[in-house]
């Protein structure tokens, strides 16, 4: 896991070295009139820029401190009740979001609150769609104390996938976050799990598409 400062660029700065890498074959191809090399360099650079894109996001109207916003773009692959074993050690509602290589990979805070604990765990790189990836894969977990009347605790977990090999985290224990704020990214295909209290209302179902920073995942009990 890498820890970096937050950026609001249209392309996440972690992608700049990869984009610059592709300029080499592009320039060599142009200089020596090797068109296929130029095309490969241009295509590689464009595809890399698309992966690291960071489009502006806007919270939906009517959100409250109890509203839980999707932390990632992708597809809901699991909604279930499980034991959250990292921090709270109790049954919680979990929603899992799978990010394919074509999705935006910037992650955002689902709520406004404070990071009261953080655990980074090295691990395997199983396919992120598999349920075992929530436990066995490399991951970075945040426990957030929500800025609501009950000081509710929720858990957000960045999980590396089969292709993803690096989790970037912008924040750590003791930092305060605002709803929809960038918290990091995962490179090249991954998953984000979010755990809510059993009293929360989940507003998504398996198979739904969600957008980080915009789609409402659920509502915490007030």
Image (spheres, helix red, strand yellow):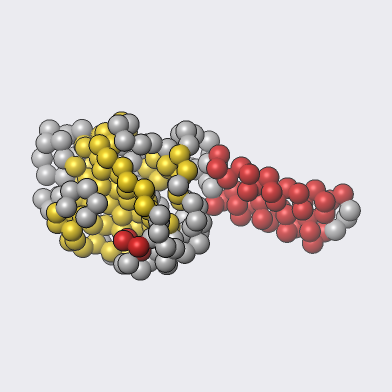
The residue sitting at 75% across, 58% down in the picture is 39
Q: Residue shown at 88%/55% (left/top)?
A: 33
Could you say where residue 9 lies in the image, as x and y percent from the top left? 53, 36
Q: Position of residue 42 (x, y in %)?
A: 71, 53
Q: Quadrant of the C terminus?
A: top left
* The residue positioned farthest toward the right in the image shown: 32
Kindly tell me whether residue 44 is visible in this rendering: yes
Kindly identify the residue that appears in the image at 82 percent across and 51 percent down: 28
Residue 11, placed above or below residue 163: above
Q: Residue at (19%, 42%) from the top-left corner?
A: 153
Taking 56 as reference, is 216 left or right?
left
Tell me which corner region of the image, top left, top right, bottom left or bottom right, holds residue 20. Answer: top right
163 shown above or below 56: below
Residue 154 vs residue 49, the one in the foreground: 154
Q: Nearer the viewer, residue 149 or 172?
A: 172
Q: How far across and down, in percent of the image, does residue 215 sit?
A: 32, 48
């Amino acid at each position: 896991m890498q820890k970096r400062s937050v950026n609001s660029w249209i392309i996440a700065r972690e992608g700049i070295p990869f984009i610059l890498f592709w300029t080499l074959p592009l320039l060599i191809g142009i200089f020596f009139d090797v068109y296929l090399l130029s095309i490969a360099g241009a295509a590689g650079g464009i595809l890399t820029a698309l992966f690291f894109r960071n489009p502006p996001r806007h919270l939906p109207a009517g959100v409250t401190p109890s509203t839980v916003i999707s932390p990632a773009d992708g597809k809901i692959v699991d909604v279930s009740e499980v034991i959250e074993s990292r921090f709270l050690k109790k049954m919680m509602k979990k929603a899992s979001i799978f990010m394919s290589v074509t999705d935006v990979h910037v992650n955002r805070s689902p709520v406004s609150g404070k990071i009261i604990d953080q655990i980074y765990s090295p691990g395997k790189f199983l396919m992120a769609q598999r349920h075992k990836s929530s436990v066995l894969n490399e991951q970075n977990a945040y426990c957030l104390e929500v800025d609501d009347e009950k000081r509710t605790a929720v858990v957000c977990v960045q999980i590396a996938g089969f292709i993803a090999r690096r989790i970037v985290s912008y924040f750590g224990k003791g930092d305060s976050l605002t709803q929809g704020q960038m918290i990091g990214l995962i490179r090249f295909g991954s998953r984000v799990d979010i755990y809510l209290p059993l009293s929360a209302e989940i507003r998504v179902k398996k198979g739904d598409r969600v957008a980080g920073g915009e789609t409402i995942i659920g509502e915490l009990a007030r």
